[in-house]
Image (cartoon, rainbow, N blue to C red):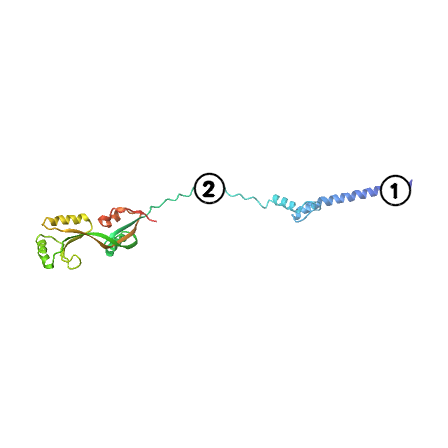
Amino acid sequence: MRGFLVGLFLLNLAVLAWSWQQAGQKDHADIAPMAAVAAGPGLVLLQELETPLATRRDTVAVASPSAPVMELPSAVVKPVLDMATTMPEATALPAAACVRAGGFESEAAAERIAKGLRDEGSTVRRLGEEVGVTTRYWVMLPPAKSAAAAAPLLERLQRAGVKDFYLIRNGENVNAISLGVYSAKGSAQRRVEQLRGLKLTPRIEEITLPRSRWWVEFEWPADKTEDAWRRLLPTEMRNLASRPCQ
């Protein structure tokens, strides 16, 4: 009987010791998370070892109050389309007029026109020469047998007040009397009619002569009227057409 009581007493001591051991482990488990929170995110708890490290870091990053989300003011962010539509449309500038005036009798005549154009703000692009042939109409009295035989005709023309005549001294028309060379056949014909009124018999001879004509190409400013450059040209050239410069 005494042995049974001693055994029962030892059993109670073992149960009490086991209860104290379990209570100590629970207190340690409760204190560990608190220490982990106080120590910061660098301390890993034993029960978190089964959780992937990346998952824990993501959780801390999302929950961290030290990284607030910044939002831009709505007035700063504007769609690209809105800014494009506010751009002003390009307006076409008026084009300058380019003109080529030709038919000047000499380089000096062309240069005088070019200078006047420059003085008015024009840009003279080119100045050049055209070489070719032209047809002229030569009015003359037929050749006499000699210079002495032509003398009475010369005196007669002088007394009648006729101008611009002379005795041809050489060539195939030697001893003929020249009465003028005309660019238009109509002008030559009027001269013939005038001399026929003096009882003379002139003739018209068509001849081909070398021709050298000068031209000027210039650019007229867009802010000036075309009437200004037309007034600078000879009368017969004032109806020339202009074109946009390229």
> Residue 234's x, y, as percent?
22, 50
Identify the disc placed on residue 7: 1
Residue at the spot 16% in from the left edge and 48% down from the top edge: 189
How crowded is the residue under tag 2: few (<14 C-alpha within 10 Å), some, or many (20+)? few
Q: Position of residue 64 (x, y in %)?
A: 61, 45
Residue 237 left/right relative to 202? right
In this rendering, position of residue 178 left or right of residue 108: left
Q: Amino acid at mark 2?
A: Leu
Q: Nearer the viewer, residue 21 or 82?
A: 82
Q: Dividing the picture into quarters, in which one does residue 210 lie?
A: bottom left
**Amino acid beneath label 1:** Gly
Image-quadrant location for residue 91 = top left
Q: Which residue is mark 2?
A: 81
**Quarter that holds the N terminus:** top right
Name, please, the residue furthest toward the front.
Answer: 145
Query: Is residue 35 shown left or right of residue 201?
Result: right
Q: Residue furthest top?
A: 1
The percent coordinates of residue 200 (x first, y second) are: 10, 51
Q: Residue furthest right?
A: 1
Alpha-carbon span between mark 1 and mark 2: 94 Å
Looking at the picture, does residue 166 appear above or below residue 33?
below
